[in-house]
Amino acid sequence: MNTLSKYNRKYYQGFMWIVLLLCCIMPIKFAFALDAECAEVKIVIEQKLSFERQAFDAHMVINNGLAGSVLKDIRVQLLFTDKDNRAVIATQDANNDGATFFYYVKSLSGINDINGSGQINTKTNAEIHWLIIPSFGAAEFDNTLYYIGAKVTYNLNGQETTVEVIPDYVVVKPQPLLTLDYFMPKDVYGDDPFTPEIEPAIPFTLGVRVKNDGRGTSYKTTIDSAQPKIVENKQNLLVDFTILDGYIDDQAVGKSLLLDFGDIEGNTAKVGRWNMVTSLSGKFVDFKATFTHADTLGGSVTSLLKAVNSHTLIHDVKVDLPDRDHITDFLALDGDVIRVYESEGQNTEVSDQSPNAVLTKVGKETNLTFPTVQGLVYIKIPDPNAGKQALNNVKRSDGKVLPTENIWLSKTRNDDLSWSYFINLFDTDTTGSYKLYESEVKEDKPVINEYSVVKGARYSLSELLPEDYYFEANKSYIVNFIGNAVATYSCSGVLNFDQQIKSCKVGLSKDYSFDRNIFMPSRSGVLHDDNTFTGNIYVSANQTKVIKVVVVPVDMDNSLTNTVSVTKGVKYSLHDLLPKKYNFEAGKSYLIKLSGDPVASYYCPGETNLDQKTKLCKTGLTRNYSFDSEIFVPSTSGILDNGSLFIGNIYMSAYYDGIIKVIVIPL
C-alpha cells in the first residue's frame, strides 16, 4: 500500500559567501605621505539561509506473507502524473532542471535495495520512505493536483511479476521564490593611518533584503551569519572586521548574528542589517554575494532562490511617502544608476541632481537649491564646512522637515591622501529648496506646551507632543504630564493605539518606546499629530482641564544604572540606592528612575529628615539635597559616597523581596 503524508521540512539554502577586497592605504603609519602604499585584504562572511517549505513523505509497505518463499530482485519505480493523467518528470538528479519533482529514498526497513537486487524474506514486511520535494514550477500560481503511484517488479520462485500500485494524490501549493539583495558601503572608517591619533571605528551597514516574488509563503525564514574571516592578507596588514549586532525591519535583535525574518508572504519583502566595524579606514573595491543549494534537498531542481545580487550602499534612507511603511530603505549605486531598494520590495530609480545643486549663504542661513523633481531625488555636493558643522532640522521650502536618515555628511579619501567632504540629501517629490542649518536646535532644549483635554477622551501620544518640536530618532526624552487630569495607559500584547478610532488594534507599527516617561522615537521629525506615528501608549483624561506637557531631552550615554536587591519591609535611604561612585555636580538636576515594582517612595513629614542609621524620620538633621517628582538636586559636588552627604526627607520602602534598577540621568 502506498500512502502520502504532507509536511513542512526545514530547508537549507547552504552558505552565503561575501567576498570583499579592502583597499586600505598604508599598512603602517609612515611619517610622510610619499611612503604610502595600498594593501589589499580579502575577507569572507559565511552565511546560511534556511526556511520551511512544502515536501511530502511517500510511504510504501510490501508484505511477504508466504511461508518458505523469498521475494527477490525487487525494483520499485515511482510514477508521477498530473490531474489529466499525463506523465510529469521526477528525478533523483539534483542537476536535472527540467523536473517537476525531486525525490530520494529516505529510509528502508525489511529490504536492502529497491533498484533490482532487493529481497524480502518470508513472513516479513518491508517499509520504504521517500522524501518528495516539488520544484517551483510544480505550482507557480495556484494549488495543483498531482498523482503519485508506483510500479513494483519482483521475482517469486523464478517468475518475474510486475504490479502497479494505485496512485495517491498530493496538492502542491504555490511556492515562495526568494531574491536576496545585499548592500555594502564603499568607504568605511576606523583608525586613520595618516594621523598620530587613534580614531574610533565607525559602524557601517551590511544590509540584506529578502524579497519573495512567489505566491507561497516562506515560513520561518532565517539568515545565520558567521563573523568575517580574513582569507587573504599578503601584506600582513594589521586589520580586523567584526559584526556587532543585527536588526530586522529597524528592530534591534541584540548581539545575535542570526536574523529571524519569520514568515515572508508572497509578493512581500523584509529587510535586515548587521552593524560592522573595521579597525582601519579603507575602501571596499570588490563585493560579491553567492549562494549554493544543498544537493541532498534537490539542488537546482528544487531551489527557491531566484537570484542573489550585491549593491554598493550609498546610505540607509527612508522613502517617507504617505503610503510607505516608514522602515529604513537602501539607497544604492548599481554601476552609474542610483536606485532605492525599499523595505516593501520596490526598486525605484533615483534622479541624481548633484550636477545641478547649488549652495548659497545669506547671513547665518545656508540654502541648498536644485530643480524641482517629482519622485525620488539624490544630491551630493561639496561641504564648505569640511564636515565641521552638523546638519540639523533641515527644512524644505514647503515646511517639510527631512528625516535625519535622509540628510547626512560623508567624506572620501583622495589620491593625494587628503579628504573630500560632502553634503548628501535624499528626498521625495521635492521643491528643490532647503535651509540646511539652524542657529538654535530645538531638540537640545526643554519645552513646555499646554493642551486642553476633555473628560473621558483618549489621546494618542503624538497628539500631545509639542507642535513644533523636532525629535531625533533613537534619542531619549522625558515626557511628563503635569496636572492631575490625565493618566497614561498601554495597549496590551501586539496591539497599538489607532489615533483615528481612539482604540487599540492590531496591524499598526510601533514607532517608539515609552517606559516610565522615557520616550524614544524610532524616527526623526516633528511628530505632533502625525497619524502615521503609532505605538502602544495612550492618554485618558479624567477631567476637563488644561494640562502641561513637558519634554526634556536626556543624555542617556552619560546616565548610570545601579542594580540593588531589596528586602520586604525594609526602608532605604536615597544614599542606599544611588550609585556609590557617581560624580554629582552641585545644583545640577538629575532624573532618578526606579525600574521594578518592589519599592515605593515616601517623604518624611514637615522639617524631619531620614536618619541613615535608625531609618527613622528625625528633626535636627541638615538636608543637603532636594528630591521632587523624581528630580534630584544635590547641594554638594563630588562622589557622594558618604551617607552624611545624602541627608534628606525621601526614603523607599520595599513591598517584597526583589531586584530594582536605579537609573540616574543628568538633565
Image (cartoon, rainbow, N blue to C red):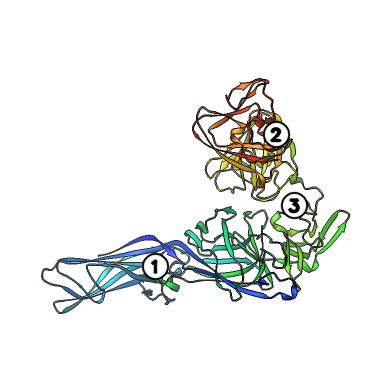
Which residue does the numbered mark 1 point to in the structure image? 133
Label 1: few (<14), some (14–19) or many (≥20) C-alpha neighbours in 10 Å? many
Q: Which mark sits nearer the N-terminus, 3 or 2? A: 3
Q: Reply above or below: 158 against 600.
A: below
> In this image, 483 relative to 83: left or right?
right
**SS class, disc 3:** loop
Label 2: few (<14), some (14–19) or many (≥20) C-alpha neighbours in 10 Å? many
**SS class, disc 1:** strand
Q: How far apart are the two marked residues, 2 and 1, measured between alpha carbons?
A: 71 Å
Q: Reply above or below: 237 against 248.
A: below
Which residue does the numbered mark 3 point to in the structure image? 401
> In this image, 225 relative to 632: left or right?
left
* Residue placed most toward the observer, 434 or 173: 434
Q: How far apart are the two marked residues, 3 and 2, measured between alpha carbons?
A: 39 Å
* Residue placed most toward the observer, 231 or 212: 231
Quadrant placement of the C terminus = top right
Q: Are marks 1 and 3 in contact (CB under 8 Å)?
A: no
Q: Which mark sits nearer the N-terminus, 2 or 1? A: 1
Label 3: few (<14), some (14–19) or many (≥20) C-alpha neighbours in 10 Å? some
Foreground mark, 3 or 2, reads 2
Residue drawn 48% across the image and 61% down it: 216
Residue 297 in sight here: yes
The spot of residue 652 in percent (x, y) is 58, 29
Residue drawn 26% across the image and 69% down it: 165
Q: Are marks 2 and 1 in contact (CB under 8 Å)?
A: no
The spot of residue 511 in percent (x, y) is 62, 48
Q: Which mark sits nearer the N-terminus, 1 or 3? A: 1
- What amino acid type is highlighted by mark number 1? Ile
- What amino acid type is highlighted by mark number 2? Pro
Label at residue 634: 2
- What amino acid type is highlighted by mark number 3? Val
Residue 272 in sight here: no
